[in-house]
Image (spheres, coloured by chain):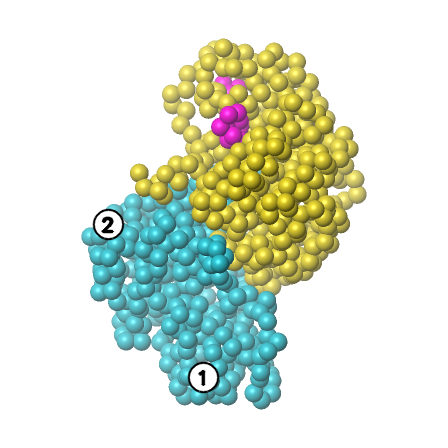
Chain colours: A yellow, B cyan
Amino acid sequence: MNLLEDKFLRIAADHAPGQEVRQSTADIKIIGGEIPGTPVDFSHGDVDAFEPTPGSLEYFNEGVQIGGKQAYTEYRGSKDIRENLALKLANFTGSNINSDQNLIITPGTQGALFLAMGSTIGRGDKVAIVAPDYFANRKLVEFFDGEVVNINMNYFETKTSSGLDLTQLEAAFKAGVKLFLFSNPNNPTGVIYSQDEIRSIAELAQQYGATVIVDQLYSRQIFDNHLYTHLCAQNLLEPENLITIMGPSKTESLSGYRLGVAFGSSKIIDRMEKLQAIVSLRAGGYSQAVLNTWFSEPEGWLSQRIQQHQAIRDDLLTKFSAAPGFNVRATEAGSYIFPKIPELNIPIHEFVKVLRLQAGVTVTPGTEFGSQFTNSIRLNFSQDHKAAVNAVDRIIKVVELYRK
Amino acid sequence: MNLLEDKFLRIAADHAPGQEVRQSTADIKIIGGEIPGTPVDFSHGDVDAFEPTPGSLEYFNEGVQIGGKQAYTEYRGSKDIRENLALKLANFTGSNINSDQNLIITPGTQGALFLAMGSTIGRGDKVAIVAPDYFANRKLVEFFDGEVVNINMNYFETKTSSGLDLTQLEAAFKAGVKLFLFSNPNNPTGVIYSQDEIRSIAELAQQYGATVIVDQLYSRQIFDNHLYTHLCAQNLLEPENLITIMGPSKTESLSGYRLGVAFGSSKIIDRMEKLQAIVSLRAGGYSQAVLNTWFSEPEGWLSQRIQQHQAIRDDLLTKFSAAPGFNVRATEAGSYIFPKIPELNIPIHEFVKVLRLQAGVTVTPGTEFGSQFTNSIRLNFSQDHKAAVNAVDRIIKVVELYRK
């Protein structure tokens, strides 16, 4: 097998969220009959249940009316929109952002991640990745010929922090890791890093001269007034060694517009722009105009959205906590919940297919977030409330049928 | 200097079209005064002069109304839209396209190029690139750690073909080149490859087991009823070794929606989808709906658009042909013209800055298309007709001021 073939095997997307329709299910055997109920796709949020920010389409249409200037922005995005964003993001995070040097608009936060990783990973570089963390992180390291160094997050062992193993992280830096990527709140667990953890990460990276990329995609959707610490505002890590990523695809349901931002290191942002020039030129020009709605939502809109998600979380937590053999930590931010399920007599990849065929429920297998999570599933609970709760009942029933 | 730093120097975007606003012009010295006139940016088409396809925005808005299903398509794009596109593209090119296996929707043709190259270039692979050809082609090879092998196109030496040096191409295949990428019509010259050339390319690639990627971005905008040959319809090259790229960003002025397609080899399309999953997930979901307008434009719309561009081309050709020391070949398709200008006493990169500052005219330096094109400039003449013609007068004047 040649190197390229091998690389593409390692970045397989067969079990990625949203790709389930392409899976073969011909040889899946089902025990018992169909379990009826409204189908729920927990692999991503339902933008029909939680609609895009009010006014977003109007901004898009205005973008089209502006015409050529909006269609052909600089590769790093429209100057006016970057200026507007830099102010809002500086205000939100408590950091300094120069719109001309320190910010790039990207096609989704996925685009930002790809560009940031492509701009910082050289062949053979060791990259520290949290287990569990967003499934693309590992694949990006593989694609850029880096080497993944796993840092465990023992999220069941504490309730006051993420449980990141800081000793492992320091050992990794000592062993030559020059890049650390993590999501905060963590995807898939919904756990927020404590202030102590964030400060330790920053101090360690500074001590060992490492670069940090922090994916803060869900940092606006915080439950129970939990404390959230922006690494970029700590003044502990050299700003040129830090990139922060955000975007309006989740809480704001704007994923269909493919928008994200990265801000921080001017050197890395410069590289990201060069890479963007050959990847897709720019984030869709007209879509960029939709960023004007971001951090400018109608009064009360965000708090209501948070409240509605918290209510769904509470109901799901209650269900999973009561189910025999399940273990779950409460989501502190964002729309993910990552229950550990009892041991099954079928592999997790087969279980998620069974669940979809038998009960109309789509979830993402834990193995997407780290190979050791063979008994976990991720749910994005940004769904119709009642449908989500009923679907969790069905998950628990199907687990009962296939338990060891 | 480390490898990554070196790589990013090699993919510099400083002189790329649209990035001129980021250039430093502090030390540019101008001879004589400003030459007044309506500013024209020839670095890309003017979508205010030639507006997006009628109905495009309405399709986008319908996409938003469809909601979640349209926002979260498979990574390779909406199944319904792929089915519709596969029929139209098969009909246009005279080839077979299975919508499920052989087609992917991408963020612009740039996205298609990036994904196709990333799916076929292994580290150290030799890749044949035409000189001149689209500026990103070389940068993509560099980014993926391939090695560029130049194949000359002697476009001034013939009027009945592109002038591609087929002897060089065969020598390259013999020397181990396994991938050949070219644009047809050629960007920047606007030359169409003859049927003999296309068939020879296919036969050589077949003989040496090479893969071909052909970028047909401008293949709908053909002047003077010139014959256009689709490589994918020749049945000379194993279909699994061929990818064809198209998109509605140019003739159809839909660049602001960031849409492209690649079709052909199922193996390469599969890889492209995996790569898309970590690059930007998918082409913008709502934007994909705009592809329904493609190849379904109102009766007469396309022929009128071609006629209008041909009229601009004719006027520009007349001007450049009459200018002392200029040499230009007539554009046969698309909106690019690539005149060779007389030798100047300033470098081409300085000249394009002077031209912009002194005469309000933006062009792309020939060196973006191959290092040897130090005395050529590219113009995208999809502009307001009168403004374009007047701007060419100013180009000729500025050249006169700086000639050797």
Q: Chain of mark 1?
A: B
Task: For the residues labelled 2 and 1, say whether their Cβ atoms are less than 8 Å apart.
Answer: no
Quarter of the image that includes the C terminus of chain B: bottom left
Decide if residue A380 is on the left or right side of residue B127.
Answer: right
Q: Chain of mark 2?
A: B
Residue appearing at x 41%, y 16% in the figure: A29
The residue under label 2 is: B209
Badge 2 density bin: few <14, some 14–19, many ≥20, Cα 10 Å: some
Q: Please, what is the three-letter code of the amino acid marked with disc 2?
A: Gly
The residue under label 1 is: B344
Q: Nearer the viewer, residue B368 or A31?
A: B368
In x, y percent, where is residue B387? Answer: 54, 77
The answer to whether any part of residue A303 appears in the image is yes
Q: Nearer the viewer, residue A336 or B214?
A: A336
B302 drawn magenta: no
- Mark 1 falls on what kind of element? loop
Q: Earlier in the sequence, mark 2 or mark 1?
A: 2
Looking at the image, residue B77 lies above or below residue A72? above
A365 drawn magenta: yes
In x, y percent, where is residue A338? Answer: 60, 26
In x, y percent, where is residue B182? Answer: 34, 60
Residue appearing at x 22%, y 57% in the figure: B174
Q: Please, what is the three-letter code of the amino acid marked with disc 1?
A: Leu
| In the image, farthest residue toward the left | B207
The answer to whether any part of residue B38 appears in the image is no
Q: Quadrant of residue A79?
A: bottom right
Q: In the image, which residues are magenta?
A: A355-373
| In the image, farthest residue toward the right | A299
Residue appearing at x 41%, y 20% in the figure: A28
Residue appearing at x 72%, y 45% in the figure: A234
Q: Nearer the viewer, residue A18 or A350?
A: A350
